[in-house]
């Protein structure tokens, strides 16, 4: 067994020399050796997940964290995950439809094994700050620092107060109950003194009167807008509804996922899109369409642009279609169900709507297919190093429809002046055991008042905090 980076590199050079037939003694042979070692390392990037333990694998991958995995190497699976690893997936990296068979490979959930813990880069620390929740999903920070969490299955909104790294147990309270699979949570008007908390039920947007510090809703829910309802997956349609307000508070955006995997029948009316409303629920219109399931939406704090974290379609193979994160263009069309990632026609709709082919927008960041990208947030704190400010973070819930698992992590999306490079980076990993079992599934992610990153995990029914204490 290879026990460290040094041993691995020695082995690589030794094998390269054997391939050359002896020691390198001329400049030509040195260049040949270097090329063959590089080739061997490229192959090893795929091979090491198969032969190393989790800890050894991550030591090697972290040492290579400044490189970007590209092409087939970027597709990978959970065994190539490690904090700091970056990926760049392009439309040209996508295989043909049905290049591999479709899979039904749901995660086998287990209790967190002894010694297992989320992994982050040096300088960061992860702690579990709340346990015993029930199906914690989306999480947002209130202006006063309280964390609001949608517990979707029991139909309630939970508050966690006192997340500050002091080591003291936070306060837990139920803000509202009796909701219908709540998910999205937003405060209105934007700014330090909201008057309402908006909640996205699966079939409506409701709001509660609110003042900073309230641990319980001070009034009944008022329905602001009705939405196409959804049930649970595998037949019931996508059910999550996220909510955000524009920076000026004049518009409310609501994401509504498709009813089906790839149908174009009447059940998809006003679905697979992002809707726009006035804050009172009037003025409904489709802001952007062809977005299969924008589970998480957010407003970039510097540019004011709307962004979305999107689950794409299934049943075309392991590496189709990539999930994605993108800024959302007003009036934009993103392809579903007839096209995907630009002018690529879904073979199940061959020949349909040729007039739309050249109108399909290509998303900013393509993710490993079937990762199930959920909530999206932007880093606005000052605790992390300066280069993190304004970057995106997203929770990857993890695949159920891929032969080799993807997702099960928190990713970072580097942005420069609000613009994406196309790359993304593994930020928190470690939720899958060496034998492929799963003990953690990130769902929601937000920035706490102290600048730490907080995320929910609906496999362990807990809340985690990532803080930074390293050198800036």
Image: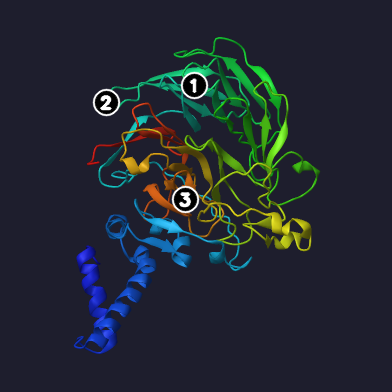
**Residue of label 2:** 167
Q: Categorize mark 3 by other alpha carbons within 10 Å: few (<14), some (14-19), many (20+).
A: many
**In terms of secondary structure, where does tag 1 sit?**
loop
C-alpha separation, residue under disc 3 versus residue under disc 2: 30 Å
Which comes before the other along the chain, label 3 or label 1? Answer: 1
Q: Categorize mark 2 by other alpha carbons within 10 Å: few (<14), some (14-19), many (20+).
A: few
Q: Position of residue 340 (x, y in %)?
A: 65, 56
Judging depth in this view, the residue of 224 and 106 nearest the camera is: 224
Which comes before the other along the chain, label 3 or label 2? Answer: 2
C-alpha separation, residue under disc 3 versus residue under disc 1: 33 Å
**In terms of secondary structure, where does tag 2 sit?**
loop
Which comes before the other along the chain, label 1 or label 2? Answer: 2
Mark 1 or 2: the one toward you: 1
**In terms of secondary structure, where does tag 3 sit?**
loop
Residue at 49% in and 27% down: 149
Q: Is residue 206 visible?
A: yes
Residue 169 against residue 365 in the figure, above or below: above
Residue 39 against residue 257 in the figure, above or below: below
Mark 3 or 1: the one toward you: 1
Numbered badge on residue 53 = none
Mark 3–mark 1 CB contact (< 8 Å): no
Q: Categorize mark 1 by other alpha carbons within 10 Å: few (<14), some (14-19), many (20+).
A: few
Q: Is residue 170 left or right of residue 446?
A: left
Task: Specify the quadrant of the image occupied by residue 220.
Answer: top right
Residue 235 against residue 168 in the figure, above or below: below
Numbered badge on residue 407 = 3
Q: Position of residue 261 (x, y in %)?
A: 68, 50
């Amino acid at each position: 067994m290879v026990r460290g980076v040094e041993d691995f590199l020695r082995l690589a050079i030794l094998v390269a020399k054997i391939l050359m037939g002896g020691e390198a003694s001329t400049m030509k042979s040195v260049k040949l050796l270097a090329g063959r070692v590089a080739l061997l390392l490229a192959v090893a990037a795929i091979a090491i997940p198969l032969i190393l333990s989790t800890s050894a694998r991550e030591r090697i991958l972290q040492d290579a964290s400044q490189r970007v995995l590209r092409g087939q190497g970027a597709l990978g699976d959970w065994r190539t995950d490690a904090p700091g690893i970056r990926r760049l997936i392009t439309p040209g990296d996508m295989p043909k439809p049905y290049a591999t068979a479709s899979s039904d490979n749901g995660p086998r959930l287990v209790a967190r094994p002894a010694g297992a813990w989320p992994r982050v880069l040096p300088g960061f620390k992860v702690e579990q700050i709340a346990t015993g929740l029930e199906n914690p999903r989306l999480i947002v920070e209130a202006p006063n620092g309280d964390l609001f969490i949608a517990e979707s299955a029991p139909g309630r909104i939970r508050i966690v107060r006192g997340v500050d790294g002091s080591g003291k147990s936070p306060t837990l309270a139920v803000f509202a109950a009796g909701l219908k699979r709540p998910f999205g949570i937003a405060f209105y008007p934007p700014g330090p003194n909201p008057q309402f908390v908006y909640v996205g039920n699966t079939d409506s947007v409701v709001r509660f009167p609110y003042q900073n510090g309230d641990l319980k809703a001070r009034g009944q829910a008022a329905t602001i807008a009705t939405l196409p309802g959804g049930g649970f997956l595998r037949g019931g349609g996508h059910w999550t509804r996220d909510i955000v307000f524009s920076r000026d508070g004049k518009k409310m955006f609501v994401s509504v996922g498709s009813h089906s995997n790839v149908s174009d029948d009447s059940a998809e009316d006003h679905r697979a899109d992002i809707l726009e409303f006035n804050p009172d629920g009037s003025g409904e219109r489709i802001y952007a369409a062809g977005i299969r399931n924008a589970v998480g939406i957010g407003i970039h704090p510097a540019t004011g642009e709307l962004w979305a974290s999107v689950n794409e379609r299934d049943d075309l193979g392991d590496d189709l279609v990539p999930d994605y994160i993108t800024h959302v263009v007003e009036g934009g069309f993103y392809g579903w169900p007839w096209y995907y990632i630009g002018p690529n026609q879904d073979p199940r709709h061959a020949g349909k709507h040729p007039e739309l082919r050249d109108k399909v927008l290509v998303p900013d960041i393509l993710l490993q297919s079937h990762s199930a990208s959920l909530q999206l947030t932007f880093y606005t704190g000052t605790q992390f190093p300066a280069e993190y400010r304004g970057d995106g973070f997203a929770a990857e819930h993890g695949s159920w429809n891929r032969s080799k698992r993807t997702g099960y992590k928190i990713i970072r999306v580097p942005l420069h002046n609000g613009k994406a490079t196309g790359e993304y980076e593994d930020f928190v990993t470690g939720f899958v055991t060496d034998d492929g079992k799963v003990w953690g599934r990130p769902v929601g992610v937000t920035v706490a008042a102290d600048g730490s990153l907080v995320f929910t995990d609906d496999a362990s029914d807990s809340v985690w905090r990532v803080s930074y204490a390293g050198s800036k």
